[in-house]
Structures are given as C-alpha cells and as structure tokens.
Image: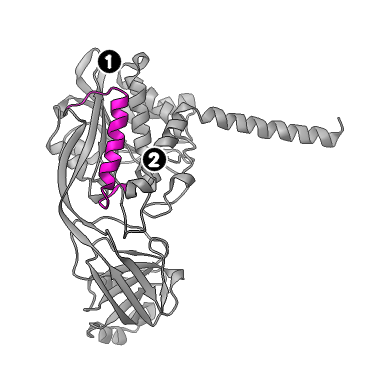
Amino acid sequence: MCIKKVSHFLLFLFFTSSLISQEIKKGPVYNYARQIVDTLASESMHGRGYVNGGDSIAANYLRSEFNKFGLKSFTGDYYQRFSFPVNAFPGRMSLNVDGKELAPGKDYIAFHWNPTASGKYATVLADDKLVQNKRKFKKFRRQNFGNKIIIVNDTGKQTTELYDLLGNSLNAKAIISLENKLTWSVAQKQNDRSLFEVVRTSIHDPKEISFDVEAEILPAHKTQNVIGYVQGSEYPDSFIVYTAHYDHLGQMGDKTYFPGANDNASGCAMLLNLAKYYSSPEHHPNYSIVFIAFCGEEVGLLGSNYYCEHPLFPMKNIRFLLNMDIMGTGEEGITVVNGTLFKKEFDKLKEINTQNNYIKDVKIRGKAANSDHYFFSEKGVRACFMYTMGGIKAYHDIYDRAETLPLNEFENLYKLITDFGDYLQH
C-alpha cells in the first residue's frame, strides 16, 4: 500500500474500533435505560406533573416494570398514596409583545405561583440606570402602576432594588423579569400578581404587552410513591434502599411540557436497572433491597417526607440508602451529597471507582436538602445522594429532552453502584 492508503486504512481502523468500543459500552443496561428515559420523557407523560394525570401515568409505568421483575409489595399494589396542594396550568398560556406572540418555554415562562389573569397594558422600564439615579428611583417607587406592566431589566447584574420589585409589584398588572436562562418550578399556592420571566434576547424595547394565563389550584392532588422490594435470603428484616423521584414539572399550558429526561427519568432508569439486577436469581441479595420512586420531589421533597413520616418498615432497619437524581451525563464524574457525614461508605465508593476506573471522579459534598435523601438522614438513616456532572446544562427547562441526553457514563456508573451494593451486602 502507498503511504496515503495506509494512513486512510489506519484512520478507518481507529474509527471502527471507536464505534465498537461505543457499542460495547451501550449494552443491555444502556439499552434498557434508553427505553425508560425515552418513555418517561415522552409527550404522553405530560411532563410527569399535575396536568392530564402525568404523574399517575408515569407511576403506572413504573409499577408495571416492578411487577414484570416480580418485586414484592408492602401495600399490595406497590403504591403509597398521599396528596398535596399544587398550582397547575392546564389551559390557556400566551404572552404577546407588540403584537408578536412569544413561544412558551422557549421565550418565556409564567411564574409557578401565577394566578389566572389576562389583559393588554402599556409598559414601563426599571433598569440599572433607574436605580443609579436615587432621586428618580425613589419617585418611581412612590407611583401606582395599576394600569401598566413593569419590565425589570438588571442587564445581567442583579441589584437588591430591582430584585425587590419582583416581590413588590407597585400594583402593576404584571411584572416581566428579563433573564439569560429560563428555569421553571412548581408552587403549592397562587399569588395575587402575575410574573413572567422572558429571555433577554426575545424582547426589545416593548411598548405594549398582552397576556392570558389559566391557572388552577388543586387543593388535594392525589398521587403516590411507587415501592417494591426483593426479600433478602439471610437478613430479610434489614434493608438496603435505592431511591429516585419520578415526578417532574408537568405542563405550562396545554401546548408546553417539560420532559425531565435528566431530571429525573435518568434516575428512574438506574432504579429500574437495579431492580432488574437484584430480582434475577444469580444476584439475589442477602439483605432485603427496597426500590422507591418518589413523587412530589419537585414541589419540595413531599413524597420522601411523607414516606419518612409513614414508613412501611422500621427506619432503624435501613442499613444504607442511596438516592439517585440526574444520572444522565457524567463526563466530569459524580458528586456524593452527605459524603462527609458517611465517610466510610464514601471512601469505599471512591476506592471501588479508583480500582476499576469506572468514571472520571467521585467528589465529596456535605449535607444538603436538595433531594430525597434529606429527610431520611434527618431521621438518623445513613443516606447519600449521587448525581452526575458535566455535559448538557439543560435543567428545569423544555430542553431537558431524551434525544439530547447522552447517558454516556450510565453503564460504568451502573457497575460502580452494583459493586458498591455488593460491598453493602457483606
């Protein structure tokens, strides 16, 4: 072969070996995880929230998978039922700027505690220049904007004065806050004023804005945690617990839903892969293993808090709990919340990773009330929370989609968790 042909051949071998390597990495665990993420993040789940029964549709899917693996149930149907109030947006959702309709989720979000409201109003601007002119800003604060919409533009440098306007609307019909990124959430009550966050580049010196929002308080939304277990062969009354929340933000109006692929269809994918693993005869555990999919995490850790107040077996019998949330990337490794509190378990997890070179890094973090492990550790349970780092930055927005979630370290992370699980079994 000539040198040119040899170089082309070597290039071909390199890319072929890379593809083979990727195929090996994308084995049964990855494939099942992809199926779960694609399903839970699909439009048919309505964002796994509180419009069109999205959370119940997702719960039923998880329950069917638990049943497929032959998991036992504490309640007979895998459900632990509870309820809570929540503000939902089931219908109308529009925001027009000088006659141009903005795209919900992409250009703007209605704040999660917004009430039902509509109207068309002239605008008034509050920005850094206004704040810097103290005399002018003082005069501005004394005005009544009952027939106006205030646009708050901090130009990316948040000031206390402008931030306070978001909470004190000066009787304005609505407040619009210009933002670089939209991040939605869920509220349990409605406020008496309307607030919108709008992407800074989607709006330019507007003169007139109209909006129409339909909101509905659900005073006692009925939902459920989904719980199954594999009974241990030697220590059936001692439990290792794996948890992940399955709810997400749901819908903002009848046309916009939040897929929640990374947050937290990915954690559910790991939960179900672990359920599949431990339910197989060759991996039958010595200690009982419980799998809990929580609802209400996005509303304030409600499902895990409810469980901790109504446990299905003695909390003191939990040997260890691992909570999994945002498991879809991992280029920069993982972080373990409560690692400083439970250093023995953290050190073992890090040791297993170092020995096998599964993922780039295992970082330690202290106590934080940022996911469903929290109320367990507050009750004295040895509990940690694991999440992946790196890769896509989509979070609490319409871009957290299945098709853009790589799951690139999923199989290696699965191996790390099952190896750690083997350690917990002894």
- Percent across and percent down for residue 139 are 26, 87
| Picture quadrant of residue 388 | top left
Q: Residue at x 21, y 15 (%)?
A: 235
**Image: 394 above or below 27:** below
Disc 2, SS = helix
* Magenta span includes 70: yes
| Residue 327 shows up from this direction | no
| Picture quadrant of residue 130 | bottom left
Instruction: Left or right? Give the position of 59 relative to 398.
Output: left
* Magenta span includes 41: no
Q: Earlier in the sequence, mark 1 or mark 2?
A: 2
Q: Residue at x 27, y 33 (%)?
A: 63
Image disc number at residue 39: 2
Where is mark 1, residue-wise? 286
Crowding near the residue tagged with mark 1, few <14, some 14–19, many ≥20 C-alpha atoms within 10 Å? some
Which quarter of the figure is the N terminus placed in? top right
- Percent across and percent down for residue 410 are 45, 34
Question: Magenta residues, as a range?
Answer: 48-74
Amino acid type of disc 1? Asn
Instruction: Left or right? Give the position of 340 relative to 4.
Output: left
Instruction: Left or right? Give the position of 337 relative to 115.
Output: right
